[in-house]
Every structure is written in structure tokens, then in C-alpha cells.
Image (cartoon, rainbow, N blue to C red):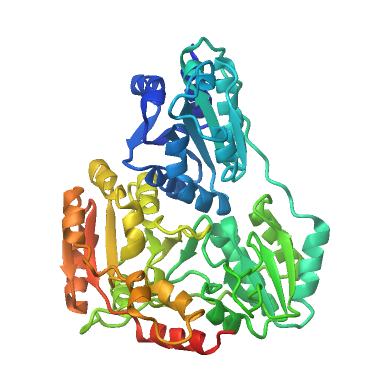
């Protein structure tokens, strides 16, 4: 057995058998060994953020890690943005990064970093990172990384090429990690808060946002009178749609969120982080919750959230409580101009049951999200946990690979779509059942809001030029077709509805380019923000 074989045995024995890869010269021994194995499925991606973003989407829906294969420090660096999102979402993942042979690194060949090592780079976005010191150690690291990853951690193994081909011992057997139990004191304190009569939010995240845990949280909220909220960007996935419990995500935009949370006197968090502002704004608070609102964390991602909620259910006497649920959408098919709300209405009518809805719709997202509350039951993913845009296409790819029997629908803004556009090629190659709804407004529209915070008067042409995607406009039909995914354009609600109906009935990747105006409500929000700047 050599080091590469020992590494792959460790991963396969731990149930980690899907690899998203963008290999180079230093990974050829690994490619060779994977090619000899029937146990590892290797999926080629054309850019490293597609690799890491797809591994994120895969793990969120498969409930287990994938592993990535990346080429030296520069290849790893190309995948950092989506690794950052995955790490903030506590997505389980194992990265294998090839490196120069240990005895060649001191010679300072081209791939060596100017001022550091791959491990220095990797630790910034990895919960755990080690470099193999021998071929046997490489297999041992595979086993340890598998265990660490299953605790919701991004793990990175740096694998010098000589550790691939040198003789190795078999790896140790896999170890299944155990989640922590929420303390009885924390559960009792949360129960006391929920019983004190103050206006309360119960905020859930991670594994509490789906399955039995979501149902338990909904019963607790119903019995205690708390408002059930979820984290702004769902880590893992959020179960939603007709018949599922009513849960509202905490809004992203600062002013909207401050207004949304106004009046809450206390917030109890189970698997979710406190509502900190994404950016600091001049003269504005850094916390979205009201001043004086008590924030209490009962359990976090390290804990068994389902068990923690069951304990809280018992402490609050919530078993058997009647849960409010979303009614099914029964409106007509939309007609007239193609808007975000019209797209949401079509999805509510046509999205199949048990679909996967991936959301990187950016400034169109609030209206589509609201309009799809009554769609058939589905799972909702959002790649923006770390704030790095461009994860929609990669995440949809990974989710579709994890769940080949389910329809995946991606809501993709045009600007951020260009960050991971290479994912289209892999979707075509793998015949992934993904429908991409490409929302084109030819603008980095979110930045118009941020510019409104700092400009004195109207934006001038030089400012606007840095927000515009219209010179030239991106022709997504040509981009998509060139990467192997058939595409068509919709400019009316009727045309979109007809195209979506066909896409939902047929398997395989498709892209619908939607020409959508910027919502009028967004312009009013810009005016509000500009008028309230410090």
C-alpha cells in the first residue's frame, strides 16, 4: 500500500466517497489511484471555487462530507471564497491539497509561496489543517480529517507528492464523533426566558431548521408564544413550503432587519449566531437586535440540536402544541411584466414536491422568497453564510450530485453568477437535473444601496460605471450554450411560466434567462438609506 491508497482507504472507510476535483501535476498519483478504484466518484470542475462550493452543497444535502482535490497553494487560494462560506456554515468537508515533494520544497520551485506555506494559507479557512510527514501519516490524517469533518468542520490535508507514492501502513479505522449535549442549566434558563411573558424570538440554525428538530422548535414557539425565526443565511438547509412550520429568516439588509427585530425584548438561539451587522456603518449600531434586548445562546453547532430542542420542549410543556403552517399557494398563473414576485408565483405553482431551491437571487431574493412560502414542500439552500458571493451555481451542482432523484432549482443573480460560471460545464457533463433561473438586471444592484450610505448627492457616471454590467451586457444564452447547458430567454411572466413548466417536466440542466426590472421597493429602500446616513 502506498500513501495515496492509504489516504483513500481512510476516506472511503469513513463513507466519504465523492470527490470534486481540479487536479494538477502534483495530484497525478492521486488521480491514478482514484482511477483504479470503483469506490470513489470523481467529478471534474474547471475552477477551484466551483470545487469547494460544490462540496459545500453536496454535504448540506447528503448529510455527509465530500472531499476536494486541489492543486498546490494557488489552486487552494482559488477556492478560498467558497471554503470561507462553508466554514461559516459549519459544513463538513475534507480538502486534499497536493504539494511539492517534501525534499523539493526547500529548493523554492515556482509553486512555493513567497512568504509562507500552504498550511499557513489553509488555516485561515479551515477548522483543522495538517501536512503529511510520511506516507503512513497521510492515511492517518485522512482518518482524523474524516472524524473532524463529521463534527461540522472544514478540514485540510496538505499532501506532498512523495507521500503519495511512498510505502504506507493501512490507516486506522474510522471513528464516528459524538455531538455535545446541551447543559441542563442552559435548557432551564431558556425555558425560564420563554415563560417570563416578554416578547421573545426563538432563533434556530443548522440542523434545527429541518426534520423533527424544526417540528419541535415550532411546537415550543407555538406553546410559549415566541416568534420562530431562523438565521439570515441558512446553514445546512431550511425545510419550507406548504404544510411546513412557519419560520421567518432574520432579514439581511440592515435597516429592514432593525425594523423587523424592533420590539423583541429577548432572543433565544439554538444553533444560530447572534444578529450582528455584516458591516459597520457610520453612526449605526453593530448589532441588529434592539438595544437592551437579551440574547441567550442555549446550544450551538457543536451540540445535538434535536436533543436540545426535545429537552426544551419537555421543560416548556410544549409536546402536542398545535403548529401554524404555511398554506398551499392557490393563486393564478402570473401574467404581464416579468417581476421577482411573478417568478415566485410560477415557482409556487410548478416547483415539484421535495425539490431543492438554491437562492443566490441577491436583490430579487426577498420577493421570490416571500412568494414561494406556499410552494410544494422543498428544501432551501443559501450559499452566503460567509458573505462571499458566487456560490449559487457551485452549490446547486453539489446539491444535485447529492440528490440525483430530486429536481434542483437555482435562483441566480447575473453579477454573482459570473463568479462560478464554470459550474455550468460540469452540470452538462454530469447531466445534473438543475434548472437555473438567471435573474438579469445588468447591475451589481446591492452596491447601489451601499453607495447610498456614503454619497452626498446623486451618484455620478463614474460611480455608476462601477456598478453597471451593461457595457457590454452579458449574453447568458451564449455563455450557457457554450458551456453545454441549453438556454432560453423570458421577458414576460407568461413566457417564463411556460419555460419553467417545460423545465420542471424534463430532466437535465437548463437555464432560463429572465429580464427583470429592479423592484420599485428597492429604489425606495435606497432613498431611505440615503436619507438616514450619518
Task: Between residue 192 and residue 133, name the one nearer to us.
Answer: 133
Percent across and percent down for residue 503 are 21, 61
- Closest to the observer: 178 or 311? 178
Could you tell me which residue is drawn at 19 percent across and 48 percent down?
Answer: 484
Is residue 319 something that shows in the picture?
Answer: yes
Image position of 333 with respect to 157: above or below: below
Q: Is residue 114 left or right of residue 319?
A: left
* Residue 184 as seen in the image, left or right of residue 352: right
State whether residue 60 is above or below residue 353.
Answer: above
Name the one closer to the observer, 226 or 94. Answer: 94
228 over 405 or under it: above or below: below
Q: From the top left corner, tell me how far across and down residue 50 is, in percent.
A: 37, 46
Residue found at x 32% / y 36%:
44
- Which residue corresponds to the image point at 59% horizontal and 37% vertical from the top-left? 120
Tell me: 289 left or right of 81. right
Q: Is residue 284 above or below residue 482?
A: below
Marks counted in the figure total: 0
Which image quarter: residue 170?
top right
Residue 307: image x %, image y %? 68, 54
Front residue of this view, candidates 175 and 104 = 104
User: Visible in this render: residue 369?
Assistant: no
Quadrant containing the C terminus in the rendered view: bottom right
Residue furthest out toward the right: 185
Name which residue lies at 62% across and 38% down.
128
Spot occupied by residue 336 in the image (x, y as percentages of width and height): 20, 84
Amino acid at each position: 500500500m502506498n500513501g495515496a491508497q492509504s489516504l483513500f482507504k481512510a476516506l472511503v472507510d469513513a463513507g466519504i466517497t465523492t470527490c470534486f476535483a481540479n487536479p494538477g501535476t502534483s495530484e497525478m498519483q492521486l488521480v491514478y489511484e482514484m482511477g483504479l478504484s470503483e469506490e470513489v466518484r470523481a467529478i471534474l470542475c474547471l475552477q477551484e471555487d466551483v470545487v469547494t462550493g460544490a462540496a459545500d452543497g453536496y454535504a448540506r444535502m447528503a448529510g455527509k462530507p465530500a472531499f476536494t482535490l486541489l492543486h498546490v497553494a494557488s489552486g487552494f487560494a482559488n477556492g478560498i471564497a467558497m471554503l470561507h462560506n462553508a466554514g461559516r456554515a459549519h459544513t463538513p468537508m475534507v480538502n486534499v491539497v497536493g504539494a511539492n515533494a517534501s525534499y523539493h520544497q526547500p529548493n523554492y520551485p515556482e509553486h512555493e509561496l513567497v512568504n509562507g506555506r500552504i498550511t499557513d494559507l489553509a488555516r485561515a479557512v479551515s477548522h483543522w489543517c495538517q501536512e503529511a510527514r510520511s506516507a503512513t501519516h497521510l492515511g492517518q490524517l485522512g482518518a482524523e480529517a474524516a472524524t473532524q469533518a463529521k463534527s461540522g468542520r472544514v478540514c485540510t490535508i496538505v499532501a506532498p507528492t512523495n507521500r503519495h507514492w511512498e510505502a504506507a501502513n493501512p490507516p486506522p479505522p474510522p471513528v464516528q464523533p459524538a455531538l455535545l449535549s446541551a447543559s441542563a442549566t442552559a435548557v432551564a434558563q431558556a425555558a425560564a426566558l420563554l415563560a417570563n411573558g416578554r416578547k421573545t424570538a426563538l432563533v434556530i440554525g443548522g440542523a434545527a431548521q429541518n426534520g423533527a428538530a424544526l417540528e419541535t422548535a415550532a411546537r415550543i414557539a407555538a406553546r410559549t408564544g415566541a416568534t420562530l425565526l431562523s438565521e439570515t443565511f441558512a446553514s445546512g438547509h431550511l425545510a419550507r413550503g406548504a404544510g411546513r412550520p412557519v419560520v421567518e429568516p432574520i432579514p439581511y439588509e440592515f435597516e429592514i432587519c432593525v425594523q423587523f427585530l424592533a420590539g423583541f425584548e429577548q432572543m433565544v438561539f439554538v444553533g444560530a449566531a447572534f444578529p450582528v451587522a455584516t458591516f459597520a456603518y457610520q453612526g449605526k449600531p453593530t448589532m441588529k437586535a434592539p438595544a437592551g434586548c437579551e440574547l441567550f445562546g442555549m446550544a450551538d453547532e457543536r451540540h445535538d440540536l434535536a436533543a436540545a430542542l426535545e429537552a426544551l420542549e419537555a421543560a416548556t410543556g410544549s409536546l402536542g402544541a398545535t403548529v401554524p403552517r404555511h398554506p398551499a399557494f392557490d393563486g393564478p398563473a402570473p401574467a404581464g411584466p416579468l417581476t421577482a414576485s411573478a417568478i415566485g408565483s410560477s415557482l409556487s405553482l410548478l416547483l415539484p414536491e421535495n425539490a431543492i431551491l438554491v437562492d443566490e437571487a441577491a436583490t430579487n431574493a426577498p420577493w421570490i422568497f416571500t412568494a414561494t412560502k406556499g410552494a410544494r414542500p422543498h428544501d432551501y439552500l443559501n450559499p452566503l453564510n460567509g458573505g462571499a458571493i458566487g456560490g449559487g451555481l457551485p452549490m446547486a451542482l453539489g446539491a444535485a450530485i447529492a440528490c440525483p432523484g430530486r429536481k434542483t432549482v437555482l435562483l441566480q443573480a447575473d453579477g454573482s453568477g459570473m463568479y462560478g460560471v464554470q459550474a455550468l460545464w460540469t452540470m452538462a457533463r454530469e447531466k445534473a437535473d438543475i434548472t437555473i433561473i438567471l435573474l438579469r438586471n445588468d447591475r451589481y444592484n446591492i452596491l447601489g444601496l451601499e453607495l447610498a450610505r456614503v454619497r452626498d448627492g446623486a451618484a455620478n457616471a463614474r460611480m455608476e460605471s462601477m456598478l453597471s454590467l451593461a457595457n457590454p451586457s452579458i449574453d447568458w444564452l451564449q455563455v450557457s450554450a457554450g458551456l453545454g447547458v441549453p438556454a432560453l430567454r423570458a421577458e414576460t411572466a407568461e413566457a417564463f411560466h411556460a419555460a419553467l413548466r417545460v423545465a420542471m417536466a424534463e430532466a437535465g440542466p437548463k437555464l432560463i434567462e429572465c429580464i427583470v426590472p429592479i423592484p420599485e421597493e428597492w429604489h425606495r429602500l435606497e432613498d431611505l438609506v440615503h436619507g438616514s446616513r450619518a
